[in-house]
Image (tube, rainbow, N blue to C red):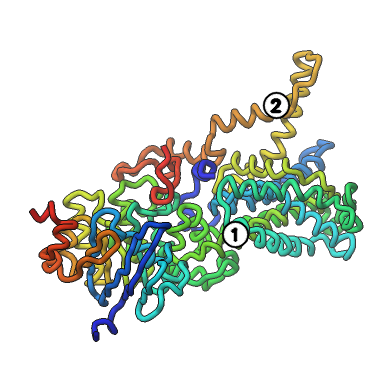
Amino acid sequence: MTQEAAALLSVRGVSVRFGGVVALDDVTFDVQPGQIAGLIGPNGAGKTTLFNCLSRLYTPSSGEILFEGTSVLATPRHKIAALGIGRTFQNVALFDRLTVLENVMVGRHSRTVASFAATALRLPTATREFRAARDRAEDLIDFMDLRNVAHWPAGGLPFPIRKRVELARALAAEPKLLLLDEPAAGLNHDEVHTLEGQIRRVRDVQGVTVLLVEHHMSLVMSVSDKVVTINFGRKIAEGTPAEVRRNPEVIRAYLGAEAA
Amino acid sequence: MAAIGSMTASANGWAMKRGFGPVAILFWILLALLPMLELVTDDPSFDYYMFMGQSMLIYAIAVLGLNLLIGFNGQISLGHSAFFALGAYTAAIMMTFAGWPFWATLPIAAAVCFGAGFLFGFPALKLEGHYLALATFTLAIAVPQLLKYKPIAPWTGGVGGVLLEKPEPPEWLGLSVDQYLYYLCLIVAMLMFWLVFNLLRSRSGLAMMAIRDHTMAAGTMGVDTSMYKTVTFGISAAITGVAGSLSAITIAYVAPDSFTLQLAISFLVGLVVGGLASLPGCLIGGAFIVLVQNSAQSISDWMKTSFALRYDVPAWAIYGVLLLLLMYVMPTGVMGGITVLRHKIAGRRSTRVNAPSPTVVRPGKTAGETTPAA
């Protein structure tokens, strides 16, 4: 119970229905600060649906989501970033006509305040804030090894680079919790290895808690402190990677082929 | 809408622009020197050229307003003639009935049009692409008739409109009326371009462009997308409204039938011809609206006389051919064409990076938002 009080993210009995389809059914789990938590399940299990509830793209039909004790569901979508929840998207949602650096700077939006009037009149406060945002974005460009594409429009870049841009953009908001939706999809073996290092560094260096949806089992199992498994919208297992790997229901539902 | 949006060729690197480039500054200085040509020419129609210059600047401002909305924020409007009209009538009514000096009507027109645009931005939130185009289209078709509406005719002058007096330049300036008004338009244009330029290379502009490229992702980054879209609609309407009041001041006359759907479409034509999401493109668009309509007529006259034709060649058909030719040669507008050309000349310098040219964006929307366009 003491664990519960300290949880950074607390998902409580969340259910989502689309018409007659139950996408999530009474899902409950916690993520502790500093954890890397994996969320796995077969295709269509409801993983992305859960992410979309966390970033307020969907509203659950019942349940509650608490982030540091604040109700996420009572927070409008555009205030989620300021709350401290950042995310990436399964199929990468970049601003294609903005440069990589500009994309990352948009990530600073929730940490800056300059108004329309202040920016239109180029007031010193707005200019200073803008410069600070750019410096911060430049740091992240280096952190994610994007220096030589910094001034390229994001739209034409190869997929693996786009994924790194998206991660840098999410980090620009200084999230406490980072939701990564299949970051390894479409990456080759070496790139997955690099990604694993980046996820660890994000947690260890920047102190960001990570919740990871991923199909790449070896990545999830090696990087996660704990793994939550859902199938057909229901949580079927929760525990350390080793525990989940041994769980018969998980093996039946999901790992069967791979575990054999 | 997606098709229009993807024509942008020069929207990149906005946030990194440090200031007006030397070319832009030189260009504005040249515009400021134009009236001085009077000293070296004895062309009797010089004042008429000055008047054309005013019109070009006014249209450039109107196109600038529309560009902020379409080119930079991804919302479409076929109804900006309505805000142009609102600005024009605000100026006319204030000068006629309240006796305000012409310059004082500009900020009021901006405020009135901002309010109108902001309010219209709310229903616009629910609509996208073609549906928003239709909704704004209703503004364009309703406004000329509304202005003729009997109960408000005492202020709007009904069908006949309102006749104004042209402002007199102060004697010590030593300028003709048309030179004076040209400078008025130029100063207002410079102010508007400066404001928009600042907006774009800032937190606000990044948020506006982020909404254009991927609304949902912008929201996830903390952008209040509804607020930004309505305020952008308001600012866009305000800028176009200022253009409208300048037109009332320089023409010294407002009438309902000057603000038809065709005006809204010419803004759109100017915008696309100049280049979406390009500020210099707005000036080119403004010039295009004035010059090409005029030259279509001249070409028609020239063809009739030089080929000894019996009937007039329809000027609008010539206009259409000119427009088609231009769009064929420069499908991303004049500024887009210039950018493409510049990069061809500069060659592929950054061969290290496995990416297409930095200026040409492939058609179709972002992956995530819609299925990738073929």
Q: Give the left or right position of residue A248, taking residue B246 as reference.
A: left
Q: Is residue B58 visible?
A: no
- Find residue A122 and report its horizontal and vertical position in percent: 56, 66
Residue under label 1, please give it. Answer: B232
Residue at horizontal 25%, vertical 52%? A185
- 10 Å crowding of disc 1: few (<14), some (14-19), many (20+): many
Of all residues shown, which one is farthest toward the front? A20
Seen from the viewer's position, the closer of residues B99 and A3 is A3
A225 in relation to B131, above or below = below
Mark 2 secondary-structure assignment? helix
Q: Which chain does the numbered disc 2 sit on?
A: B
With A21 as the anchor, is B151 left or right in this view? right
Q: Is residue B195 left or right of residue A108?
A: right
What kind of residue is marked 1? Answer: Thr
Same-chain status of marks 2 and 1 = yes
Foreground residue among A101 and A196: A196
Q: Where is residue B233 in the image (x, y as percent from the top left)?
A: 62, 58
Horizontal and vertical percent position of residue B205: 52, 59
Q: Mark 2 or mark 1: which comes first in sequence?
A: 1
Residue positioned 67% across, 62% down in the render: B119
- Dot 1: element: helix
Q: Is residue B235 above or below residue B40?
A: below
Q: Which residue is drawn at 42% across and 63% down?
A: A58
Q: Which residue does the numbered mark 2 point to in the structure image? A: B317
